[in-house]
Image (tube, rainbow, N blue to C red):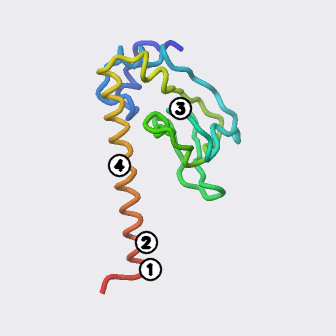
Amino acid sequence: MSFSASQAQVLARTVPLFRSLSPDDVSKIFAHGNTLRMGKGQVVFYQGATGNTMYVVLGGSVALYEGQKPLALLRTGDMFGEMALINNEPRSATAVAAEDCHLFMLSETTFQRLLTKRVSIQILLNIIGTLSHRLRETNTRYAKLQNEVAPPT
């Protein structure tokens, strides 16, 4: 899928996965990846399934579930499934289109073979930054729950 220079500039500025990449780099990434449209309620992937593709929400929203428990609602610019590029463990959640959505898919093959080393390293750094932010948010929520259950004395 090709994107115009202005679309690539917007993605380079607004999508955390593409932070610190040039619009030209983003255009090249999209040239190697695929996009898909999902209807509301369609499953992107199931918890426990093996995967080697990550996704970026280009429009709409995707809900993540652990079993029946909602975990997160991801919107335009958010990425998910990124752990599939890092390890070969089963998916930790089920991803479902919460509304009609447009997704960008980046496979492990594309990541390892087609992207330049500089771009791949920057994407990995961006993934690490996102995972670190999510862990920090989870730690904060956990600490608040601990305080509600057993307030400090």
- How far apart are the alpha carbons under marks 2 and 3? 34 Å
- Mark 4 vs 2, N-terminal side: 4
Identify the mark at residue 52; answer none if there is no mark. Answer: 3
Q: Residues within 10 Å of mark 2 (few under 14, many from 20)?
A: few
Horizontal side of residue 111 vs 40, given as left or right: left
- How far apart are the alpha carbons under marks 4 and 3? 22 Å
Question: Extreme bottom residue here?
Answer: 153
- Mark 2 vs 3, N-terminal side: 3
Q: Residues within 10 Å of mark 1 (few under 14, many from 20)?
A: few
- How far apart are the alpha carbons under marks 1 and 4? 25 Å
Residue type at numbered disc 3 = Asn
Q: Residues within 10 Å of mark 3 (few under 14, many from 20)?
A: some
Q: Secondary structure at mark 4?
A: helix
On the image, the x and y values in percent for residue 98 come to: 63, 43
Residue type at numbered disc 4 = His
Q: In the image, is residue 87 above or below residue 4? A: below
- Mark 3 vs 1, N-terminal side: 3
- How far apart are the alpha carbons under marks 4 and 2? 19 Å
Identify the mark at residue 145; answer none if there is no mark. Answer: 2
Q: In the image, is residue 139 above or below residue 79? A: below
On the image, the x and y values in percent for residue 82 come to: 46, 37
**Residue that badge 4 annotates:** 133
Q: Circles 2 and 1: CB distance less than 8 Å?
A: yes
Q: Secondary structure at mark 2?
A: helix
On the image, the x and y values in percent for residue 106 come to: 50, 26
Identify the mark at residue 149; answer none if there is no mark. Answer: 1
Q: In the image, is residue 129 above or below residue 8? A: below
* Residue name at image x 59 percent, y 54 percent: 66
- Mark 1 vs 4, N-terminal side: 4
Exactly how many numbered labels are in the figure?
A: 4
- Mark 4 vs 3, N-terminal side: 3
- How far apart are the alpha carbons under marks 3 and 1? 39 Å
